[in-house]
Amino acid sequence: MTTTVGHPTSRGLVKRASPELMIDTGTGLDFETRLDRLPGHLTPTDRFFVRNHAPTPRIDVASWRLSVVGGGVREPVTYTYADLWKFPLVSVVRTLECAGNRRKHFAESCGRRFERTPWGRGAISTAEWTGVRLRDLVEPAGIAPRACEVLPEALDEGRARRPMPLSKAMAEDTILALVMNGEVLSPDHGYPARVVVSGWLGAASIKWVGRIEVAEEPLHVPWNTEDYVLIDPNDPPGGPALGAPIAEMPVTSFVELPWPAQLTPGQQVIRGRAYAGEGRIDRVEYQVDEGPWHGTTLLPPNAPATWARWQVLWDARPGEHLLRVRATDDRGRSQPDSVPWNELGYLYNAVLAHPVHVEAIPSDGDGAPEETDRQTAAVAEPKPLPAGWGLAGV
């Protein structure tokens, strides 16, 4: 049984990470989505965030093989790339978010520095993924009665791998994706095949998969013992992991504006997105400065494990403002005001105070604001928009 090892590219990524669409975190491997450049519900592939632990490998699909092995199966199975296309294909729209998203804001909030990728807000994106249900590939190998975990493994230099419970691997919406947004996967996003694990941290959705191990006992690898765990020095670990392994992502939200933002005075449509891991967004609230919280308008579609779009109409008053957004999901989970510190800076979903500068109102020549501008400036409370308003433009 042979598996083709991917050869890394001469630079970290294959695609050109244009600064107009993506933000370079400085690692050479990790690039954020520009949240103020999102044209629709799905994130175009050219601006979908990239998290790599090693340079993107270039894989020869002609000799590539996918092996299903381990003590949790009765008979190992090997698939070619052509074999995968013979299975029934399914499509799911799912959001992926790195567990370290907003780490830079976490560091600022606690006055400490983290030795990990300094993500801002943009390590989150959404795509339509098409591929084969993972269970359809594992079941032909014969699942042993005591099988409990499934471990996809990548073909990059670091052999990225992370286990998940058998129940999650066999879920209806856990797939081995071959297609992203209607096109065959690109190298940076996992070609020829990647796992998509709904609602969980992005590290669970292993790219460049070449091997799937099914085990009869819990599996311990760096990504669930040393990394992607919540390390609290005041709570010593009781097992092989340095902290609790991260699974589902928490509720979070963001505003689709640069950080900091600059606006002209008057009525502004403020847009954003909210995400709740495996859950569905129930509501998104919005606050200007220290004023009261108001509701926003949620736009369709709004489904589990996928971000929801929201929008609000704000009559922006000149000056410096802080805009806060707070999301709540269908299980009653809401964004907190603060998040307890953890050593690696994961899962920071606290409500952010988004700085916005609104330009001064131009005068009418005698030093006084124009009448219409005085009226506009007098109103600063946001107003939700009708659900169907402006859909052609979002």
Image (tube, rainbow, N blue to C red):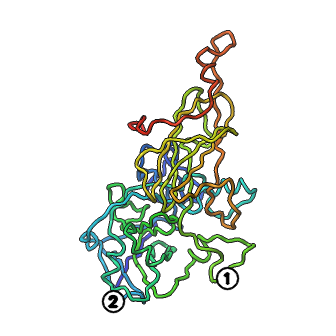
Instruction: Give the CA separation, mark 2 to mark 1.
Output: 35 Å
**At x 37% / y 69%, what residue is drawn?**
172
* Quadrant of the image containing the C terminus: top left
Task: Look at the picture and state if 293 lies above or below 308.
Answer: above
Task: Look at the picture and state if 260 lies above or below 48.
Answer: above
Instruction: Please identify the quarter of the rendering in which residue 294 is found.
Output: top right
**At x 34% / y 86%, what residue is drawn?**
76
Res 11 seen here: no
User: How far across and how far down the image is residue 130, in percent?
Assistant: 33, 62
Viewed as shown, does residue 273 lie left or right of 260? left
Mark 2 or mark 1, earlier in chain:
2
Crowding near the residue tagged with mark 2, few <14, some 14–19, many ≥20 C-alpha atoms within 10 Å:
some
Viewed as shown, does residue 110 lie left or right of 62? right
* Quadrant of the image containing the N terminus: bottom left
Q: Amino acid at mark 2?
A: Glu
Tag 1's secondary structure? loop
Q: Which mark is residue 75?
A: 2
Viewer-nearest residue: 118 or 198:
198
User: How far across and how far down the image is residue 392, in percent?
Assistant: 38, 37
**At x 59% / y 61%, what residue is drawn?**
100
Q: Amino acid at mark 1?
A: Gly
Q: Residue furthest top?
A: 366
Residue hosting label 1: 238
Task: Look at the picture and state if 62 lies above or below 364.
Answer: below
Task: Look at the picture and state if 88 lies above or below 302.
Answer: below
Q: Nearer the viewer, mark 2 or mark 1?
A: 1
